[in-house]
Image (cartoon, rainbow, N blue to C red):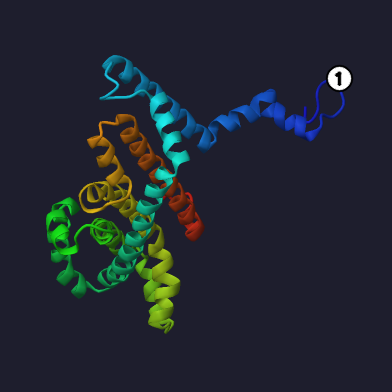
Amino acid sequence: MKPQERQGQGPVPLPQAIATAQGGGYGWLRRTLANRWAVAVRSFAIFAALWWLFYAWNGNPLQLPSPVVVVEAVWELLVGGELAEHALISTVRLMIALCISILLAVPLGFWMGHSPAVNSFVDPLVELLRPISGIAWLPLALFIFGVGNTLPVFIMVYVGFFPILLNTVAGVRQVDRKLLSAASTMGISRGAVLRYVLIPGALPTVMVGVRLAFAASWAAIVAAELIGSPSGLGFAIEWYRQLLMTPKVFAFILVIGVVGYLCDVGLRSLQRFLTPWSEGTGVQ
């Protein structure tokens, strides 16, 4: 019997047959629940439930306020415009620092990946500086740059530089050598090889480095703004901590997580747009 026919009845319309094959009329529900955003909402709901349990167990709202009180604080700060102001300042600083990191790290990474001599010279310096936390530079950076926008940007550039650099080097080295040999045999110029072979081959790994750099820089900006900035999310957290206004402290912490999540979603979408050929290779 064909899937579009039932015994004793005429042919079944194709949409109805598809719905039946997918589990009756509930296939749409399963597809909705399996959607990435639906999965994210479920994860956030579980997190909120665990938060509420810890709040009930702790019993001290000054140490750990309830999710409801924090959401009310978020709404109050949002209506007052303070939340958007600090979030925008921190996000702009992050974007500036990420662009500087990319402009510095990607060309150097291609050079190191393509030239063993350059790599042997630069790599020891990279491995010397990379283990040093960006926060360790705060006292010196505060002395050099003072309080303002420059210090947080410097810390984020330093933190974001190394993931992009190392992933760029790894991406260049992963390019198929046969393609480079074939391009050389055909007499293709170095510029064309860079544009049509090296960059497409290394770009998926470079984008992974950009995502890692974003995560590291976004985490570092809070510490940098706690000390070296009169504005931003980190500054707001320290300000309300001194005032013992814990719900607003948690409100800004929650905003840091939400902004970071949304930016990472945007970077993933950009990665899929720039490297559609990497889909299905495990690069997400």
- Kindly identify the amino acid type of the residue bearing the numbered disc 1: Gly
Residue 124, picture quadrant: bottom left
Compared with 218, 41 (above or below) is: above
Front residue (pair 78, 265): 78
Picture coordinates of residue 109 (x, y %)?
A: 28, 67
Residue at (41, 83) in percent of width and height: 189
Residue that numbered label 1 is attached to? 8
Residue at (40, 32) in percent of width and height: 73
**Left or right: 29 with respect to 159?**
right
Residue at (26, 62) in percent of width and height: 150
Compared with 19, 105 (above or below) is: below
What is the secondary structure assignment of the residue under circle 1?
loop
Residue 3 in view here: no
Residue at (47, 34) in percent of width and height: 40
**Left or right: 125 with respect to 206?**
left
Front residue (pair 184, 79): 79
How many residues crowd around disc 1 within 10 Å: few (fewer than 14), some, or many (20 or more)? few
Residue 262 in view here: yes
In which quadrant will I find the N terminus?
top right
Q: How many marks?
A: 1
